[in-house]
Amino acid sequence: VIRERYGIVTGGDKRFDLSDGVLSLGAFVSFSDNNIRHNRGGKSSIDSKSVGLYMTYDTHGYYIDGVLKFNRFKNELRTHMSDGTMVSGDYHQNGFGGSLEVGKYFSLNENTWLLPYARTTALAVNDNNISLSNGMKAEINTTHSFQGEVGVNLGMDLDVGKTKIRPYLTAGVSHEFSNHNKVKINKAYDFTNDISGTTGKYGLGMDVQLTSNASIWGEANYLKGNNVESPVTGTVGFKINF
């Protein structure tokens, strides 16, 4: 399976200088296109549109980040069954989720920093009845996900001429607690979609500040857990602050 993802996020926030820290409140919208090329042939996609709110509070090297988000998913399935028959199906779902992260910034020397963090993430996606082109039907109950994660980032702040560069390494462990998502096939066969398990996460990246309000960044990650292993994946982006 080959996965490709493209997306854009835009938003705005307001900064408040408080007596003991800095509070930022904001809102955003995002659009993403996720494509999956199946080993048996065919290409499926999940398009997502989302709106959300976020907050960040910084005080004495500590920070708290919170996000609430609503998603609208458009799913298009195009693949082959084990006998080679082409099958397709389209359906929509809504999702609502949020995350909360806390961390502490440590300065190791003039250029090097360490950032341990802890994060929780929750998501619920509504139930749906799906009909495929070959007559197969699936009843998907509301899907839940709840994850906890701890990790650490280690990086440096470097000045190369007039350009600021921030390379970093990241490592973490996450655990998915949800183990009881239900699916019924053709009104007869019940399945439990158990997505629970512990996963190790490792990555490296770099943020390059081109101007006072524009930067580019890239990141590579590898995941391995009880029931999942992801090859090295890469992400690149361009960010503009107005």
Image (cartoon, grey):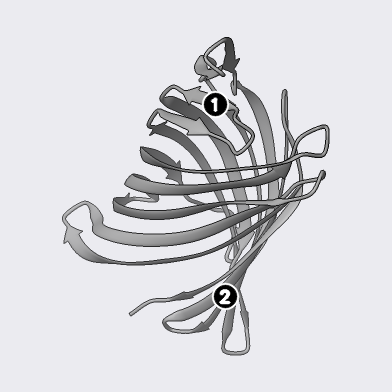
- The one nearer the camera, 172 or 131, is 131
Instruction: Return the x and y of residue 15 as percentages of the image width and height.
Output: 22, 64
Pointer 1 or 2: first along the chain: 1
Question: In the rendered view, does 161 fall on the left or right side of 184?
Answer: right
Instruction: Return the x and y of residue 26 as percentages of the image width and height.
Output: 25, 59
In percent of the image, x 52 and y 20: which residue is there?
177
Give me the C-alpha separation between circle 1 and circle 2.
Answer: 44 Å
- The one nearer the camera, 124 or 94, is 94
- The one nearer the camera, 240 or 164, is 240
- Please tell me the numbered disc located at residue 174: none
Question: In the rendered view, does 55 fall on the left or right side of 212?
Answer: left
Q: Is any part of residue 207 visible from this angle?
A: no
Q: Where does label 2 land, which residue?
A: 216
Q: Where does label 1 land, which residue?
A: 137
Snapshot quadrant of residue 210: bottom right
Q: In this picture, is 18 found above or below 147?
A: below
Q: Counting other residues with Cα less than 10 Å from the Cα at mark 1, is it few (<14), some (14-19), or many (20 or more)?
A: some
What is the three-letter code of the residue carrying label 1? Lys
- The one nearer the camera, 21 or 77, is 77
Question: In the rendered view, does 239 fall on the left or right side of 22?
Answer: right
Question: In the rendered view, does 16 fall on the left or right side of 197?
Answer: left
